[in-house]
Amino acid sequence: MFTRYRTVLAYSGAWRFSLTALVARLPISISTLGVVLLVTGLGRSYGLAGALSAAYTIANGLSSVVQGRLLDRLGQRVVLPVVAAAYAVGVAGLIISLESGWPEATAFVAAFLAGAAYPPIGSAVRARWSHVLVGRPGDVQTAYALESVIDEVIFVIGPTVATVLATQWHPWAALGLALLTGVPGTLALAAQRGSQPVPHRAAQVRAQRAVMPWPPVVLLAAVSFALGSMFAAAEVSTVAFSAEQHAKPYAGVLLACWSSGSMVAGLITGTIRWRRAPIARVRVGTLMLALVMVPMTFVGSMLTMGLTLFVAGFAIAPTLIALMSSIEQGVPAGRLTEGIAITHTGLAAGLAPGAALAGLVIDAHGASPSYLVALGGGVVAALASLALPRSFDPDAPNRADGVGDSDQLSIF
């Protein structure tokens, strides 16, 4: 089962940049949760926590595509150190402003800076895989599957460690962990020049820029937006649920259960050769994600919630893999990083309203009803997926590179 994973990791430098990227993108599983833990740990409201999380995620969503283009044009070794430094300033400013009781506007500015500066590590590492494995589309697919599993490992490790640190040591510790992993990890990734894609300067980009199939890309971004809202609402609701059960230190364990289910499903999905088109799997996956949110409102114990979240997690990775497979198969090879970044932007942008709305419901009605916000996000994603075409243009330019066979799994 794991032979294909061992094969791609044997390529020169592959395991180093993949492992480094794991550390560098640990903040994606910590940042918004860390904001919630810091704000509520200081005795402030879930509404403020959700709003600050929204500021962070909106900024991240707005900057992702811009950063992706800069990475393509200038190279990772130039862009990554700059944005890492700005991210450090933003996170530090957010912690200090809240701890010191500065005006809330200061915290919002810091949160916006941190979100805007956090680099799209997931896109960067996948671009490295495509560069290292050029001409080997089957190996690229396996590498993308590996990265999707690593994403889930991050969401198992990050929330658990961050919650324990924030509740047992100090409220700012979760964001501190994001700072101490994201910045050094990003700098270490930038230092690995041998595996970096060759930058495409502006003149080259203007000359070679292929046409993006915008209608399906925008629809997939809309699906991503709804899924992001669902994920964020469920995360905030789970933290509040744990607090109501007088077990807030175990909120990270519950979130780890959710990610563990997704990780197992991702491992399995990455070894399957699919005959159904990715977009068809997106439709099925979004429907399943909506359905698995239904029981959350009725759960009344930590143990039951953990089991429910674990089972629900099995719908996450296959859906996201299918969604990113659709992008990989449908956009031109020269704009693959941009296409992935657009979808990531949709996910990131969706986190903001999901977290904010769930926070408002928690403040007004408690944790259990707030899971209905997550359910709503899943329903919207399922409905939006129905508007997707059956497939992208089969003559998309990147098919000349051998990527995107309809009977194979193209992976995140």
Image (tube, helix red, strand yellow):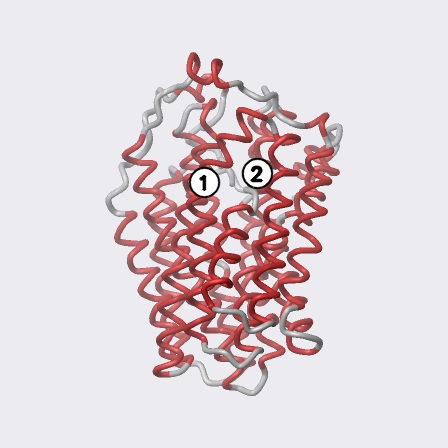
Nearer to us in this view, 139 or 408 = 139
From the viewer's side, name the closer residue of 250 and 285. Answer: 250
The answer to whether 114 is drawn above or below residue 374 in the figure is above
Mark 1 crowd level (few <14, some 14–19, many ≥20, 10 Å Cα):
many
In the picture provided, is 412 more to the left or to the right than 149? Answer: left
Characterize the local packing of mark 2: few (<14), some (14-19) or many (20 or more) Cα atoms within 10 angstroms: many
Q: Quadrant of residue 14?
A: top right
Q: Amino acid at mark 2?
A: Tyr
Q: Position of residue 204 (x, y in %)?
A: 49, 14
Distance from label 2 to label 1 (Cα)?
A: 9 Å
What SS does tag 2 mark?
helix
Whether residue 22 is visible here, answered yes or no, is yes
Q: Is residue 271 visible?
A: no
Q: Which residue is mark 2?
A: 144
Question: Which residue is tagged 1?
Answer: 324
Measuring from the top left, give residue 214's x and y in whole percent. Answer: 31, 32
The residue sitting at 33% across, 30% down in the picture is 392
Q: SS at mark 1? A: helix
Along the line of sight, the residue nearer the viewer: 261 or 16: 16
Q: Are marks 2 and 1 in contact (CB under 8 Å)?
A: yes
Task: Please name the amino acid that badge 1 sits on.
Answer: Met
